[in-house]
């Protein structure tokens, strides 16, 4: 078990290596940007800045946001289209870099309209993922809160409106709105019509987070508000099964629970029933995952970043307990919440178990690590220093 100084130093080293690997620092002429990884990276740099006071970490966060917008907010080099994917002019695109959404950053171009669907190949094709966009909204929100600049949260709100309008739809037979999982780069057609299990939840939590930051931290009057978008997501979440045996998904439930509890603590919306559901679903997921024996397998059979998703969620349990304990608005269901939290505390040691396994050099020689080196490095750093991402 490392002490806190050593943990911070290792996280900083990982993020320095990531900056060099992807063309962030020193700046490369063709930086390798990937939206999910970069969202966690921005939060990591901000967390390291808050913890150490090192202005270079803050500068890397600022530079990374700019690189993402100018790389993933614009068309690919191998695309016949050029400029901002929003279709805005160069000047207007600079002012509204998220207005058209942001590309995933996959290695292959998106599937053309005349190309048949290939499940395996689709994983490597570009487009837009809703759950990546919500992670970027969260990163921009953290940028505003740490830097004191409201421009970032306004960009995040603009991204939220665009993503919601394009990813959600009413089924032909009417009824509750649904969501596409993957859209084309220009957001004109779905590439994968199925709905991500937790996409509506991520949207609901993130929209609330953005609106709370804009109004509470900066006194902004957000017009129009995200009220309709929140109502849509609430409807989609109602009755949805949240439990999953995927460690990344379970970690996401815990992260969303942490954000909900913190927002309630500082005067945000009260989602007591949803909070109970998330904690109960996370418990079911943890039980299923630990019973599977996955953590006993050698590295070549394990996916590091998915496990780090779980360890990041576990890192927030202590603060989650504090937030719930301090919040009188949750007192009506306090017994149920505390019972579930007590059960969740039993799983907290898994965080160090997961980190310890992947900190062993021989395990980072496995193809499952080297093939996803960037995302694995960044999410290991987040697990070691989760404050930047979780806001704790």
Image (tube, rainbow, N blue to C red):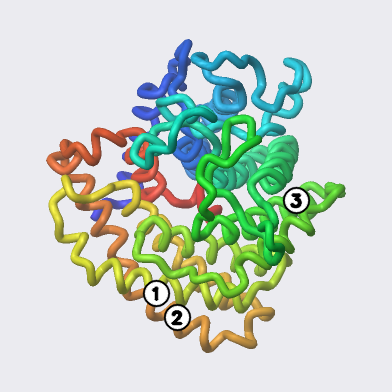
Residue occupied by mark 3: 217
Label 2 crowd bin: few (<14), some (14–19), many (20+), radius 10 Å: some
Residue 347 is situated, as x and y percent measured from the top left of the image, at: 32, 70
295 displayed left or right of 333: left
Sequence-earlier tag: 1 or 2: 1
Other residues around mark 1 within 10 Å, as few (<14) / some (14–19) / many (≥20): many
Q: SS class of the residue under badge 1?
A: helix
Q: Earlier in the sequence, mark 1 or mark 3?
A: 3
Horizontal side of residue 126 vs 157, given as left or right? left
Q: Position of residue 9 (x, y in %)?
A: 34, 39
Tell whether label 2 touches label 1 (CB within 8 Å): yes
Residue at left offset 77%, top offset 54%: 226
- Separation of residues labelled 3 and 2 (CA atoms): 31 Å
Residue ID for mark 2:
340
Residue 309 in sight from this viewpoint: yes
Q: Nearer the viewer, residue 3 or 349?
A: 349
Q: Can you tell which quarter of the image residue 369 is in?
A: top left
First reached walking from the N terminus: tag 3 or tag 2: 3
Q: Which image quarter is the N terminus in?
A: bottom left
SS for dot 3: helix
Please state which of the two labelled residues, at mark 1 or mark 2, is closer to the viewer.
Answer: 1
Q: Nearer the viewer, mark 1 or mark 3?
A: 1
Decide which of 362, 12 is in the foreground and name it: 362
Q: Residue furthest top?
A: 29
Task: Work out how far the residue at label 1 is from the one at label 3, CA to CA, in angstroms.
Answer: 33 Å
Q: Give the Cα separation between the discs numbered 1 and 2.
A: 8 Å
**Which mark, residue 283?**
1
Q: Residues within 10 Å of mark 3 (few under 14, many from 20)?
A: few
């Amino acid at each position: 078990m490392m002490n806190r100084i050593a943990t911070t130093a290792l996280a900083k080293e990982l993020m320095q290596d990531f900056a060099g690997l992807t063309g962030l620092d020193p700046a490369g002429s063709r930086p390798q940007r990937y939206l999910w990884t970069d969202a966690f990276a921005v939060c990591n740099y901000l967390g390291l800045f808050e913890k150490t006071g090192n202005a270079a970490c803050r500068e890397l966060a600022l530079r990374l946001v700019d690189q993402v917008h100018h790389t993933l907010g614009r068309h690919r080099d191998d695309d016949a289209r050029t400029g901002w994917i929003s279709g805005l002019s160069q000047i207007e695109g600079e002012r509204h870099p998220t207005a058209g959404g942001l590309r995933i950053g996959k290695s292959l171009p998106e599937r053309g309209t005349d190309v048949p669907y290939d499940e395996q190949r689709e994983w490597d094709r570009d487009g837009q993922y809703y759950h990546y966009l919500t992670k970027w909204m969260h990163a921009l929100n953290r940028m505003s809160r740490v830097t004191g600049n409201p421009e970032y949260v306004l960009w995040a709100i603009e991204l939220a409106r665009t993503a919601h309008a394009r990813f959600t739809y009413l089924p032909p037979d009417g009824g509750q709105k649904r969501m596409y999982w993957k859209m084309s780069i220009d957001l004109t057609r779905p590439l994968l019509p199925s709905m991500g299990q937790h996409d509506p939840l991520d949207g609901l939590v993130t929209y609330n987070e953005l609106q709370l930051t804009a109004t509470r931290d900066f006194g902004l009057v957000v017009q129009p508000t995200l009220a309709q978008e929140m109502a849509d997501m609430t409807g989609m979440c109602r009755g949805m099964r949240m439990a999953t045996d995927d460690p990344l998904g379970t970690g996401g439930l815990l992260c969303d629970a942490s954000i909900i509890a913190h927002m309630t603590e500082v005067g945000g919306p009260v989602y007591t029933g949803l909070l109970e559901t998330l904690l109960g679903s996370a418990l079911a997921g943890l039980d299923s995952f630990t019973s599977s024996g996955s953590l006993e397998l050698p590295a070549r059979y394990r996916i590091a970043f998915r496990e780090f998703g779980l360890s990041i969620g576990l890192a927030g349990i202590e603060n989650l307990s504090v937030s719930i304990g301090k919040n009188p608005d949750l007192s009506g269901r306090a017994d149920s919440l505390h019972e579930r939290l007590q059960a969740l505390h039993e799983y907290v040691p898994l965080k160090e178990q997961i980190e310890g396994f992947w900190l062993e050099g021989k395990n980072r020689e496995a193809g499952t690590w080297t093939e996803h080196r960037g995302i694995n490095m960044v999410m290991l750093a987040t697990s070691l220093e989760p404050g930047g991402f979780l806001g704790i």
